[in-house]
Image (cartoon, rainbow, N blue to C red):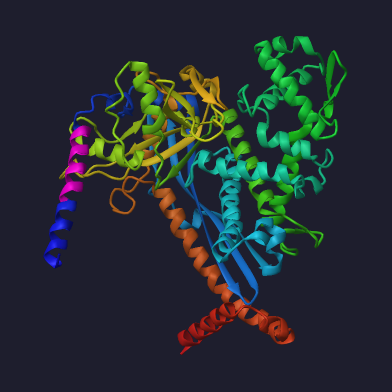
Amino acid sequence: MGENYEITRLRNSLNQIIRIFENRVREMSTIPYYKDFIRGYRNEKLYENFKEFFGEGDFKIIGIDGSLTQERRMEMLIFYVCAVGFYGYMTIRKHEIKLDVSRAKEEEAISISTSIPLWMEDIPNIDPEFEYAPDDFEMMKTIDSIPYALMTMSELKLANDQINSEEVKVIILDRMLSGTYGPASRDFRNLLKRGKSIISRISTSKGNPSMLDINLAGYMGPGSIHIPFRDPYTAYAAIKKLIEEITLGENRFRKRDLPKILNVKEEIAKEALRDMIQLNMKYNGELMVDEGEYITINPNVKGYWDRVWQATETILKKIYEEKSEHPLMFNEEDWITTLDLNTINLYIIYSIMDKAVKTNKLIIGIVKDTNATDLMRSTIPYILNMRNIEQKGIPRFRSDKALLSLISSINYSKINVPWRTIEYDSTMTTIIQEQINGGARFKAAREIIGREQFTLKGYFQLRALTEDPSIRSNVFSYDRPVYPKYDLKMKKELKCIQFDKEIIIEPIIELWDNENIIGDIILYILSKSDNPHLLEEMGHNHLLFLADKLAKIMSKRASKVIDGLTSLDLMATTKKYKAYFIARRFRDIRSEIEHIREIKAKQM
C-alpha cells in the first residue's frame, strides 16, 4: 500500500478514462447524420442574396465590445465602463462582394463611456439585494452586477446609435442577443414584482410612462416582435393584436368575437381574456373597461412604447452625456437601480432588433466560450425524430462546442471550412427531451419554454491549418434576430410539455435543403472578417479583437485616473470625518493601507 501502489492505481485510472475518450472519438467517426446539422459554404446566388438583403453600394460593418473597471477607496466604489466600435468596409457592386476589415483604424474607432462613484451606504439604493447579502461573496456579487449592467448598456447603446446610420449595414457584438435578453428580462420581471421604477418618473412629450406601459414594453417591445399565444405570453399576444385593431379605428370588442379577432381557438381566447382582466385589475383599470358583453381598450394604451422609449432615451442621455450631476441620480434622491438598468437594456435590445428587421440590417452576436448543450439536448433529437433515426447513439459531451470541434476534426476530409451549423430557434435552449409515459417527449427544461421566433442561433468554424487540416480554429456560437420575410418559411410545429400540459410551439429550425439566405450571408461575412495571421484571433473576428483591445486600454487608463483623483479628493474628506472612517471594518482598512504602500513602492 505504498507509493508504487498509488502510481499503479493512478495509471490504471488514467488508462480507463483515455479508453472512454477514445470510444467517444470512435463514435464520432461513425455518426452518419452530422450532415443534417452542418452546412458548408454555399456560393450559389450569394451576390443576389447580398443585393436583395442589403442593396448595392459601399457600406460599413462595425464590431462592438466593452470593458469595465472598478476601484474601491475608503468607503467609496468607483465604476468605469466603456464600449468601443471598429469599422470594416463592405462593397456590393457589379456582381462582386468585397469585405475588408484590414483597414480598421483606431483614429476612426468610436466609443462611449461613463464613470460612477458610489458610497457603500448608497449601494442598497442601486441594488436592493445588497442589503440582504448574507456574506462577503454575495455582497461582492451584488456589487459586480452594477458595472456589468452598465457595460452591457454601453455596448447596446453604441449598437443602437450605429443602427441609425445609413452607412452601417452589419453590427457584430461580442455577446449573444439571446444571452443578454435572458438576464435583462429576468430583472424586468423582478422590477414588475417590486412595483416601481425610475422610468415612471421621467416626463415625456406624451406624459409619464405608467407601470402598465413599462410592463407592456417589456413583453411586447415596439409591437413588431412575435408573441406566442401561450403562457405566460397569452395576454400580451392578445393586447398586441387588439392594439393593431385600435390603429384601424376600433377599440370596443365583443367578447364572443375574440376568437375571430385574435385568430385563435375559443379556449385560447378565453385564457387571453382572463389574463387581460387580471392585468387590468393589477393596474387599476388602465388597460380597458369591462362592460360585461364588451371590452373597451383604453386608446392611450397604444402609445405605451413611445412613452417608455422617450423615457429610456432621457435616462441614457443622463448616464452618458450629462456631466454636472451624478449619472445614476435624479433630483438628488431618486436612484436608477440595477433593475431599471437591465429593464432599459431589454428595451434597447427590442429597439435594435426592430430597426434591424425593418431596414434589413444584420446584427450578429458572437460568444467565444460557451458550455451550452442545446444542440445535443434538443435540436439533434428533434432532427432525428423528423428522420425517424434511433437516438441511442447521440453522443454526450460537456458542450455543443466540444461535440462540434471533434466531429469537424475527425471528419476533416469531408467537412470543409468555413462551415456553420443549421440555424435554430433560441427557444430550443429552454427545451429538453425526456422519457415521459414510456415515450420520448419534449418539455420545458425548467418551468417556462422561452418565446419562439425571436432569435436564431448557430455555431461556426472558419479555419484549418494548411499543413494539417485536422487542426482547426475554435468553434464559436452566434445568434441573430428573426427576419420574418426570410425565416418564417422555416417555421415548424413542435409538441411540448409545459406546466404538465401539452402545448404546440412554432420554432424556426433550418432543416435539410431549406434555403436560408441570412445564414449563408453571415457565414460569408464572418469568413472574411478574421485575421488568420494572429493565432489568438484566427477563426474569430478582427473587428471584435480590435474593439476588445482598445476597450481594455481605455479601462486601464481610467483606472490610473481614478486612482489619482480619489487619492487627492478623498484625502480631505478622510481627515474631516476621521471617526467615520476609523469605524470601518479591519479588513477594509488593511486593504487600503496595502494599496497605499503599493503606490509608494511604485513611486520609489
Q: Is residue 318 visible?
A: yes
Q: Position of residue 353 (x, y in %)?
A: 58, 35
Total numbered labels: 0
Quick check: is 543 in the magenta stretch? no
Residue at horizontal 32 percent and vertical 28 percent from the top: 39
Q: Which residues are magenta?
A: 15-28
Hey, which residue is sitting farthest front in the picture? 1
Q: Position of residue 456 (x, y in %)?
A: 47, 31
Q: Is residue 55 visible?
A: no
Left or right: where does residue 93 sit relative to residue 177? left
Q: Position of residue 205 (x, y in %)?
A: 83, 40
Residue at horizontal 14 percent and vertical 67 percent from the top: 2
Q: Position of residue 459 (x, y in %)?
A: 37, 36
The answer to which of 197 and 466 lies nearer the viewer is 197
Quadrant for the N terminus, please. Answer: bottom left
Picture quadrant of residue 406: top left
Left or right: where does residue 104 sit relative to residue 116? left
Picture quadrant of residue 148: bottom right
